[in-house]
Amino acid sequence: MLEAIREDLLRLHLELPRHGLVVWTGGNVSARDPESGLVAIKPSGVRYEDLTAESMVVVDLEGQIVEGSNKPSSDTASHLYIYRHRPDVNGVVHTHSRYATAFAAVGRSIPVYLTAQADEFGGEIPCAGFAMIGDEAIGAQVVETIGRSPAVLLKNHGVFTIGASASAAVKAAVMTEDVAATVFAALQLGQPDILPDEVVERLHRRYMNDYGQ
């Protein structure tokens, strides 16, 4: 079931350690099949080098296992909450990437100091409140706080990103850490200037409508 999605999910999970976004078994990616509404997600506590397409767990939007012999990620309920409340989202990623999580640790959003952030995010990367792991509480914080951004920080926790596809959500996770690392370095040198809203809007519109092939 969802064979192509599970194969793609394996490939996308391997992008996370490749970009330094996760360590050991932390973090996860899920993908929703737009046709069936079913969701494939990483199994809980499995190291990335041990993952296979077959080890991914398929669940329905209420969290019932449809296929797979493993226990799904402990973040599954939050992923599913996001999918139920954001029909435009078909991919969710959670990481504890180092620099972005440093901002989350102090409950600090990342303002738009960089054109790359304006392009990809269209505004600040917001920081949501604290929520306990294991139920829908984190998902509720994500939906409430993320706005039009593809990324949100969770206070004292880490990063959630969303996208129209799992690949788009992984890209957002990579970009979030890149922005966070650059902003962290800039703050060691001085106080960078926040880009004006109208500049951010123009850059984001150009990126979304004109950039690329």
Image (cartoon, rainbow, N blue to C red):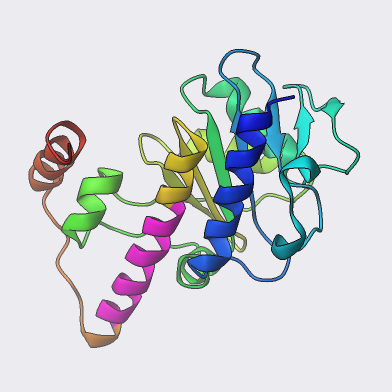
As drawn, is 45 to the left or to the right of 210? right
**Residue 136 seen in the figure:** no
> Is residue 161 depicted above or below 67 in this figure?
below
Number of marks in picture: 0
Say which quarter of the image contains residue 46. bottom right
What quarter of the picture does the C terminus occupy?
Answer: top left
Q: Which residue is drawn at 63% across and 38% down?
A: 139
Nearer-the-camera pick, 46 or 77: 46
Task: Please tell me whether residue 167 belongs to the stretch shown in magenta.
Answer: no
Report the magenta residues as a range. 173-187
What quarter of the picture does the N terminus occupy?
Answer: top right
Nearer-the-camera pick, 105 or 30: 30
> Is residue 86 depicted above or below 99 in this figure?
above
Percent x, y of residue 97 = 53, 66
**Residue 8 seen in the figure:** yes
Percent x, y of residue 29 = 61, 46
User: What secondary structure is the magenta-colored segment mainly?
Assistant: helix
Percent x, y of residue 2 = 68, 26
Q: Which residue is drawn at 48% across and 66% down?
A: 19
Percent x, y of residue 111 = 28, 58
Q: Residue farthest to the bottom?
A: 189
